[in-house]
Image: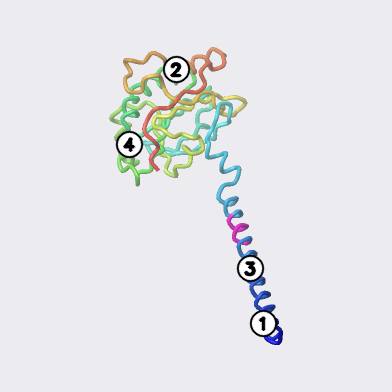
Amino acid sequence: MKTVSKYLPMAIIAFLLIGLGSCKNENKNQEEVATHKNEEVAMATPAEVENAKGYTIGDQATDFKLKDVDGDMVSLSDYPDAKGFVVIFTCNTCPFAVASEERMVALDQEFKGKGYPVIAINPNNPEVQPDDTYELMQEKAKEAGFTFPYLYDESQTIYAKYGATKTPHVYLLKKENDKNIVKYIGAIDDNVRNAEAVKDRFLANAVNELLAGKEVTVTETKAIGCTVKQ
């Protein structure tokens, strides 16, 4: 009994020390979990998540001020008489974009006089895709005979706001109460590889419906092209 009585206080102290250590570890773990939760919230606010998705039909599209290949800064507000815009994200080298160049010129010639000019924007980062520098954009516009602005999204922010993921990727906008409203998103037509095999001109059909005072029948199609290089 004396031996048990001798070691009992030591056992009690050891038990208390272990319990205290466990509480500290538990509190530390809870603090770490709370910290990770806070980091997750900071990493992606609801507004940031929504912006990452890009525009959907009926959204108001942002204006921009981007450098054209002739050195001028261009924005949608520079076209007060326009009824809307055919905004096409494209680039210098993607085979799908190159195959669409003549069609883009034809669309501009067909609809610019009717109030829907083509505005082309290069979203690619030239550090990732060296053939998409501003200087090579200037050469491309001249060689391809572009009749429309070919703008350099130098900060790579406009394509993200719109939600463009491919080149080419089309956004048809209509002016409504001084706002540019998205009416169509997707492809130019049903055969990006071969213009001669086109059977359905998605974009032209949508513009013609708007010009006729109608709602767009086919509002979204799948954009087929190269991924935006970032």
N-term-proximal mark, 3 vs 1:
1
Among numbered discs 2 and 4, the one appearing first in the sequence: 4
Q: Which residue is mark 1?
A: 10
Check disc 4 and report the residue beneath it. Answer: 138
Q: CA distance from mark 2 to mark 1?
A: 88 Å
Say whether residue 177 is magenta: no
8 or 195: nearer the viewer: 8
Task: Name the colouring of the figure.
Answer: rainbow
The image quadrant that residue 6 belongs to is bottom right
The Cα atoms of the two marked residues, 1 and 4, are separated by 85 Å
In three-dimensional space, the C-alpha distance between marks 3 and 4, rounded to whole angstroms, equals 68 Å
CA neighbours of label 4 inside 10 A, class few (<14), some (14 to 19), many (20+): some
User: Which of the two residues, 111 or 43, is positioned nearer the viewer here?
Assistant: 43
Where on the picture, by quarter, is residue 156?
A: top left
Asked whether disc 1 touches disc 4, contact meaning CB atoms under 8 Å apart, the reply is no
Nearer to us: label 3 or label 1: 1
* Residue position for label 2: 204
Residue at 61% x, 67% y is 25
Is there CB contact under 8 Å for labels 3 and 1? no
What amino acid type is highlighted by mark number 2?
Ala
Q: Which residue is mark 3?
A: 22
Q: Residues within 10 Å of mark 3 (few under 14, many from 20)?
A: few
Q: Amino acid at mark 1?
A: Met
> Is disc 4 placed on a helix, strand or loop?
helix
- The magenta stretch is 31-36
Disc 4 residue type (three-letter): Gln
Q: Is the C-beta separation of discs 2 and 4 under 8 Å?
A: no
* Foreground: disc 1 or disc 4: 1
Residue 32 part of the magenta-drawn span: yes
Left or right of 209, for residue 139: left
